[in-house]
Amino acid sequence: MDFIPFTFIDFIDIFFVALIMFGLYRMTRGTNAPYILSGIIIIYIVWVVVRALNMELLSSILGQIVSVGVLAIIIVFQPELRSFLQMIGMRRKGFYFINRIFNSHDSAGPNLTPIVSACTDMSENKTGALIVLAQQSDLRDIIDGGIRLDAQLSQPLLENIFFKNAPLHDGAAVVMNNRIVAAKCILPVTQSNVPKSYGTRHRAAIGITETSDAIVVVVSEETGGISVAFGGKIERNIAPHNLPQAISLHFVNNENDNNKDRRHRRERSEGSAGHATNATPDTK
């Protein structure tokens, strides 16, 4: 009895299919997507059985449904597919030049002084806050879903937005090019496994950073703790004096700036060593 040949390429093929299926499962977990997918699979199985029984009328009807199945899947799972493609793009840091081509806004970090001062005061008063610092990713959908402001970034304005009785306190404020472009913005909540102690603000901060290069600063309303989220991860309970460093660490151009600084420091140290050699006094 001959067995079906199984090669290393077949193993790679199965591995990648399993990886894609696992990724789809993680994205759709906690939503209605698995039930929809189960319904599609059931329709396909029924269609196969009907064809085997030569039930021509029912087979033709189900065949029309199955024939447009791919298009239906794209339409039904459009948010999940978009999130999946964004997640793939975010994992390819070497392609940041594409964002630079299509996004004209400056990637330099904002003025952190008003953000740090406002977060420090809100932390002491236990005022909840959710501040999104936009970088190169397009956050147009998030901004359009909120209330547009386009105001100069300042400490009093941030504290006024997130004041407990203010109309705009519920949601996130988006900061771009040292301006608060929108407030009361709704962020996507992460579907990943996170501790139950994480509130809605922390889950939303992780969610938006999973599909963009934005940096999110969170102030907890319950504890007053300050957190910074980036790349789908969050660092909690940051001391106010460490907040500027925690934010600037995630700037997109931070790595290039660090390389330049190291090169300049090396050149200065080499130049200083050369001057020190030439300046050595003659002891003869």
Image (tube, grey):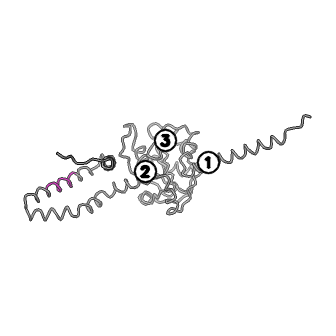
Asked whether the beta carbons under mark 3 and mark 1 sit within 8 Å of each other, the answer is no
The crowd level at tag 1 (other Cα within 10 Å; few <14, some 14-19, many 20+) is few
Residue on which disc 1 sits: 259
Mark nearest the camera among 2 and 1 is 1
Is residue 91 visible in the rendered image? The answer is: yes
Rendered residue at 7%/61% (across/down):
54
User: Residue 106: percent from the left, percent from the top?
Assistant: 56, 58
Residue on which disc 3 sits: 227
User: Residue 45: percent from the left, percent from the top?
Assistant: 16, 54
- In the image, residue 120 sits, relative to residue 79, either above or below, namely above
The reply, left or right, for residue 97 in relation to residue 33 is right
Q: Which of marks 3 and 2 is nearer the N terminus?
A: 2
Residue on which disc 2 sits: 208
The residue lying furthest to the top in this view is 283
Residue 198: quadrant of the picture = top left
Main SS, magenta residues? helix
Q: What element carries label 2?
A: helix
Per the rendered image, the range of residues in magenta is 38-46
Tally of marks: 3
